[in-house]
Image: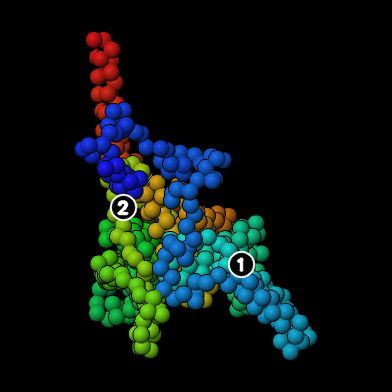
């Protein structure tokens, strides 16, 4: 009995009783997939129907459990935004004569840009609580970068004057505070050192643990920041702290506690089962409310394994990430010193909060770009923009800081940085360079021997 076409398709090419061209001619080479394994996407690939050539919409790729919030509402948002904009711009009850309309105009422009960002920007790696939230975070980062680029072309006095447009109380020199006046180790001095900044330290390292998701990375960054404070206290007097403030209060108490709690939360999220039920499939008011609250929890959680000692690429990535984190930590101290802002000023606090929110998807994108280059064929938008923001801050600090810090670099600090830089160069040379040279020489020797034979 001759098998039908469907039955023939189900049989293996090498099944008994069936002739197979594959068995005679050998296994066929897989067809190259455009866009994967380095294969270019050509013009005639546009009409292909394979799964790897199709752009999967967000609604099909992810579980849109709360369906209403994932429906496209671009025209509705445009109409609503224009109605609100027209009302504010045209109604005299809102803008009375004689009031400063420039500030409201700037706010309206920022809101319009953020609405465009929320609707039209690309999705990042996170989908909770909603991709729109992370698009807005990217939009805020872009606005901050544009503001930094504008300020970069101003001199320091002009930048200080412009800051008064945001807060009229700014523009006044502030005295620098030193924390190394009484370094006697007593219970009273420790208690007096406990202030709101200790809570900020703990929360900050809790956030860094959530971003980096690695104990050793957090410990190295914590010690490196304290060494940076030692190195820069000749420029910023508030970096001058007692030894026990550096290593006991900061590293062993605040930083360790924040890192420990953050890593415990990471471990919980790593092993937590993620099973999502749709909002309509959930019965009862209380389960529905619980389902809505779960929308603010991660959709999944990836444990980071940076692999610092595996190869030179991972080592370079970790060193670069460490340098960027240190710069992001030190930049606000210099900015508040140059622009005359208190440490607890709302601008400084908002900057720290938004950099934390921007770093969450940025580090995830960097990790995926380094460890999964087949899927992440280019660096993500969050990490690209955040790196540009940190570098622009450094450029502004370098420009405005000329002549502001006349005290030269101490010789001990200079020799310390030279020693650290030497060790940083020697480690990858011994770990990766020497084995690579040995492998190359061995391969060359075998090749020459084979040619001689």
Q: Residues within 10 Å of mark 2 (few under 14, many from 20)?
A: some
Numbered disc in front, either 2 or 1 = 1
Q: Is residue 81 above or below residue 49?
A: below
The residue pinned by badge 2 equals 306
Q: Is residue 96 above or below residue 326?
A: below
Seen from the viewer's position, the closer of residues 347 and 246 is: 347
Say whether residue 408 is left or right of residue 192: right
Q: Secondary structure at mark 1?
A: helix
Residue 431, percent from left and from top: 27, 39
Name the residue located 49 percent from the left edge and 39 percent from the top edge: 40
Name the residue located 65 percent from the left edge and 69 percent from the top edge: 162
Q: Is residue 44 above or below residue 289?
A: above
Alpha carbon distance from label 2 to label 1: 35 Å
Residue 103, percent from left and from top: 68, 76
Residue 215, percent from left and from top: 27, 61
The residue pinned by badge 1 equals 116
Q: Is residue 288 above or below residue 248?
A: below
Say whether residue 133 is left or right of residue 14: right
Name the residue located 55 percent from the left edge and 70 percent from the top edge: 72
Q: Residues within 10 Å of mark 1 (few under 14, many from 20)?
A: some
């Amino acid at each position: 009995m001759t098998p039908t076409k469907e039955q023939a398709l189900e049989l293996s090419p090498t099944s008994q009783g069936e002739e197979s061209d594959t068995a005679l001619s050998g296994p066929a080479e897989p067809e190259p997939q455009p866009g994967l394994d380095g294969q270019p996407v050509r013009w005639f690939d546009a009409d292909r129907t394979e799964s790897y050539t199709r752009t999967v919409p967000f609604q099909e790729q992810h579980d849109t459990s709360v369906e209403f919030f994932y429906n496209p509402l671009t025209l509705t948002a445009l109409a609503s935004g224009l109605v609100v904009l027209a009302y504010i711009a045209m109604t005299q009850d809102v803008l009375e004569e004689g009031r400063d309309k420039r500030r409201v105009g700037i706010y309206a422009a920022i809101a319009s840009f953020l609405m465009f960002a929320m609707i039209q920007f690309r999705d990042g790696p996170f989908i909770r609580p909603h991709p729109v939230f992370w698009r807005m975070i990217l939009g805020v980062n872009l606005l901050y970068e544009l503001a930094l680029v504008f300020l970069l072309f101003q001199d320091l006095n002009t930048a200080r004057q412009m800051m008064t447009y945001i807060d009229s109380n700014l523009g006044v020199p502030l005295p620098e505070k030193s924390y190394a006046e009484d370094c006697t180790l007593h219970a009273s001095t420790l208690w007096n050192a406990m202030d709101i900044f200790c809570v900020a330290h703990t929360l900050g390292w809790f956030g860094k643990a959530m971003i980096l998701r690695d104990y050793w990375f957090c410990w190295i960054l914590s010690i490196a920041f304290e060494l940076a404070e030692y190195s820069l206290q000749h420029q910023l007097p508030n970096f001058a702290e007692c030894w026990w403030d550096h290593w006991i209060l900061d590293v062993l108490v605040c930083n360790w506690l924040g890192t420990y709690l953050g890593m415990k939360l990471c471990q919980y999220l790593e092993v937590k089962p993620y099973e999502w039920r749709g909002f309509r499939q959930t019965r009862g008011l209380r389960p529905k409310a619980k389902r809505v609250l779960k929308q603010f929890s991660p959709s999944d959680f990836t444990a980071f394994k940076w692999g610092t000692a595996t190869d030179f690429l991972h080592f370079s990535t970790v060193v670069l990430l460490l340098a960027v984190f240190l710069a992001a930590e030190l930049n606000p101290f210099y900015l508040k010193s140059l622009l005359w802002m208190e440490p607890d000023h709302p601008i400084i606090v908002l900057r720290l909060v938004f950099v934390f929110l921007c770093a969450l998807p940025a580090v995830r994108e960097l990790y995926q770009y380094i460890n999964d280059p087949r899927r992440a064929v280019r660096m993500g938008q969050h990490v690209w923009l955040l790196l540009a923001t940190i570098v622009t801050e450094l450029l502004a600090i370098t420009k405005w800081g000329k002549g502001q810090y006349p005290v030269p670099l101490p010789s001990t600090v200079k020799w310390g940085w030279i020693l650290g830089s030497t060790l940083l160069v020697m480690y990858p040379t011994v770990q990766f360079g020497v084995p690579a040279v040995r492998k190359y020489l061995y391969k060359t020797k075998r090749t020459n021997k084979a040619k001689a034979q």
